[in-house]
Image: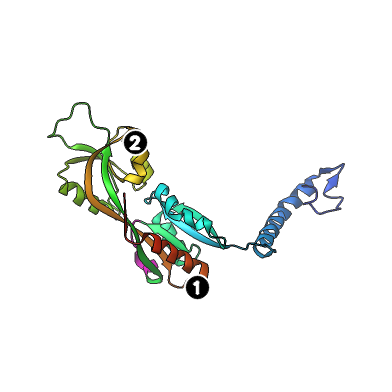
Amino acid sequence: EISACLVGSEMCIRDRSLTDAGRRALEFTEPMFATAERLLEAFGKSSTPRTVVEIGITSSVSRSFAADFLLPLFDDPDLMPRIRHGSAAQLMQRLASQEIDIVLSDGKPAGVEEQNITTELAMELQLLLVGQRPAKENPGDPLPFVHYTSGSPWRFKVDECLRAAGSSIDVVGESDDLSVLRMAALKGRGAVALPRRVVGSDLDDLRLEVLADLDCALPVYLNYAEATVEEAVRRTVNRLLASARGTRLA
């Protein structure tokens, strides 16, 4: 800390301790040194320079299978994947302004953002109706169900699939976060419709059970800015699409 302060200044150092003036000076100099470190990281000599690719994942897209989907990128010696999470609206805005390179989402961009964004189908997720079966089940009673919110692109699709499966539901809660839906099912709050990848370990450990196989696949989209010129970003997009375009994942 002393070296970060104005080196050699009597205002900063007294008996090897920072004075009040020194502490104030340090407040100004610390950001300068931090910026210098980042510049050295970005432009300093390196035997293996990497290009940072910013990737956003919306809360509705499960982090578990997204991690599996993105993990191969870490094997590329030329890339530095940087994964971020946020709401679809926030991430799409950052994508349109080129603050982020790629966004995985449950829906396509809308409004102004869609004019500058290219959207590709990355994968389709096969759904299961899972939950904890009641000890005494009356077939005539609707099943307590924690649903996707009415604003979610997946809401209408799931409703269609539940009707096709003949499942009568009583919506007791809503969320667009798959981890919240999973936890609601584990706590016995209601059944949920989730991909097997999200609840696979819960099914194996018998914490949850499959109440119905739904003939329903939810899309996950890969979005990127049309103005992207970074070769690393283009290569990342092509690599992800080549590995998972249109794949139905259990």
Q: Quadrant of residue 190?
A: top left
Residue at 51% x, 60% y: name it: 54
Q: Is residue 191 visible?
A: no
Q: Quadrant of residue 114?
A: bottom left
Q: Is residue 107 magenta?
A: yes
For marks 1 and 2, give the one nearer the viewer. Answer: 2
Residue at 49% x, 62% y: name it: 100
Q: Is residue 167 magenta?
A: no
Instruction: Name the residue at the top extreme.
Output: 135
Q: Position of residue 64 (x, y in %)?
A: 41, 47
Residue at 46% x, 73% y: name it: 227
The chosen color scheme is rainbow
Instruction: Please name whichever residue, 66 or 34, is drawn nearer the observer in this view of the structure.
Output: 66
Instruction: Please name whichever residue, 60 or 71, is drawn nearer the observer in this view of the structure.
Output: 71
Q: In the rendered image, which residue does mark 2 sit on?
A: 204
Instruction: Please name whichever residue, 43 or 199, is drawn nearer the observer in this view of the structure.
Output: 199
Lateral position of residue 239 relative to residue 143, left or right = right
176 in relation to 89, above or below: above
Q: Quadrant of residue 34?
A: bottom right
Give residue 229's mark.
Answer: 1
Q: Position of residue 96 (x, y in %)?
A: 44, 66
Q: Position of residue 211 (x, y in %)?
A: 23, 38
185 in relation to 93, above or below: above
Boundaries of the magenta span? 106-114
Query: Please, what is the three-letter code of the amino acid marked with disc 2?
Result: Asp
Query: Please, what is the three-letter code of the amino acid marked with disc 1?
Result: Val
Check disc 1 and report its element: helix, strand or loop.
loop
